[in-house]
Image (cartoon, rainbow, N blue to C red):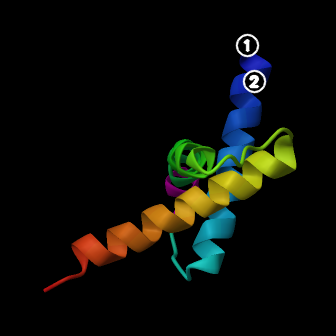
Amino acid sequence: MIVNLLISLIVGAISGWLAGKIMNESGSWLKNIILGIIGGVVGGFLLGLIGISGTNIIGSIIISVVGACILIAAGRYFFSKK
């Protein structure tokens, strides 16, 4: 149980950091972890709709990065409109 939580936090941190680098977004390590974990949920849902799933840690990171990039893009779209 604790090991799974630690793995999720590590995957979330890596995914959030990678998404931040890809989308040129700066943020703290806590923001990266949160973004990566929520990105994993979003990416898992959206990619699951078309039949794509991650079966290992690398797949989970890729799906989380895609979801986190989608979240960053959506945030920019909705919160930077004037």
Badge 2 is on which residue? 4
Report the side of 41 relative to 80 (left or right).
right
Name which residue type carries label 1: Met
Nearest the eye: 52 or 19:
52
> Where is 51 relative to 27, above or below?
above
Res 24 quadrant in image: bottom right
Q: Of helix, strand and loop, which mostly describes the magenta segment?
A: helix
x 62%, y 51%: residue:
50
C-alpha gap between disc 1 and disc 2 = 5 Å
x 13%, y 86%: residue:
82
x 77%, y 44%: residue:
54
- Residue segment shown in magenta: 28-32
Badge 1 is on which residue? 1
Q: Secondary structure at mark 2?
A: helix
Residue found farthest to the bottom:
82
CB under 8 Å between discs 1 and 2:
yes
Residue 37's disc is none
Residue found farthest to the left:
82
x 54%, y 43%: residue:
45
Report the side of 73 relative to 41 (left or right).
left
Location of residue 31 in the rendering, given as x and y in whole percent from the top left corner = 49, 55
Name which residue type carries label 2: Asn
